[in-house]
Amino acid sequence: MNKDCWRQKLITYYENIDDEEFQKKFTRDELLSLTDPNSGDFEKSVCNFLIDNNYGDFLKPQYEIGPYRIDFGVVMPSEGDKSELKLAIECDGYQYHSSADQVRDDVDRQLILERAGWQFFRLNSIEWYGSRNLSEDKVRKWLIEKSKR
């Protein structure tokens, strides 16, 4: 694309990752304190799961990308081509994802960030609490699959 193209500039803007945020190592308590306090225990339990599965060094809760925010940014090297993976884990709780407008806004934001190279995994709070082991297995498999590319 032409470097003066506004679309290219916009995509480049969203592609850029604040490497300093991901190079800084956070303690468990620091990571937990960065989760959205309005999500109750849902995001904290997902954060604990990610830390317990050795993703703490690659994790940033409530990560900001331009004007957007994702529940968990996971930025890590890929095993396959040695590039940087940009993974977003979104926690869809009932309270904040129940209206058509909220869902539409989430989809719009996700589509924009996917064009900038982010890959999304969505967790539903009802599934997380209703069948925790199955949900954890899905997240674990997704993270492993993505890291091997």
Image (cartoon, grey):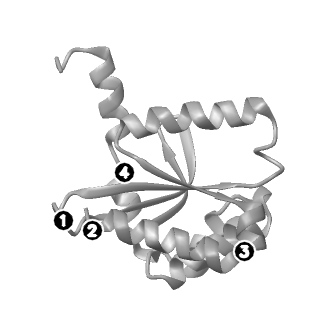
Q: Is residue 20 visible?
A: yes
Give 98 or 116, whichever is nearer the viewer.
98
Measure the C-alpha gap from mark 1 to mark 4. 23 Å
Q: Earlier in the sequence, mark 1 or mark 2?
A: 1
Disc on res. 80: 1
Residue at the limit of the structure toward the bottom, as seen here? 52
Q: Earlier in the sequence, mark 2 or mark 4?
A: 4
Tell me which amino acid carries mark 2.
Lys
Measure the C-alpha gap from mark 3 to mark 1. 32 Å
Measure the C-alpha gap from mark 2 to mark 4. 23 Å
Measure the C-alpha gap from mark 3 to mark 2. 26 Å
The answer to whether the residues at label 1 and label 2 have Cβ atoms under 8 Å apart is: yes
In the rendered image, the vertical position of residue 53 relative to residue 12, given as above or below: below
Measure the C-alpha gap from mark 4 to mark 3. 35 Å
Disc on res. 148: 2
Disc 3: which residue: 131
| Secondary structure category for the residue under label 1 | loop
- The residue lying at 36 percent from left, 67 percent from top is 145
| Secondary structure category for the residue under label 2 | loop
Q: Nearer the viewer, mark 2 or mark 4?
A: 2
Q: Earlier in the sequence, mark 3 or mark 2?
A: 3
Tell me which amino acid carries mark 4.
Asp
Q: Earlier in the sequence, mark 4 or mark 3?
A: 4
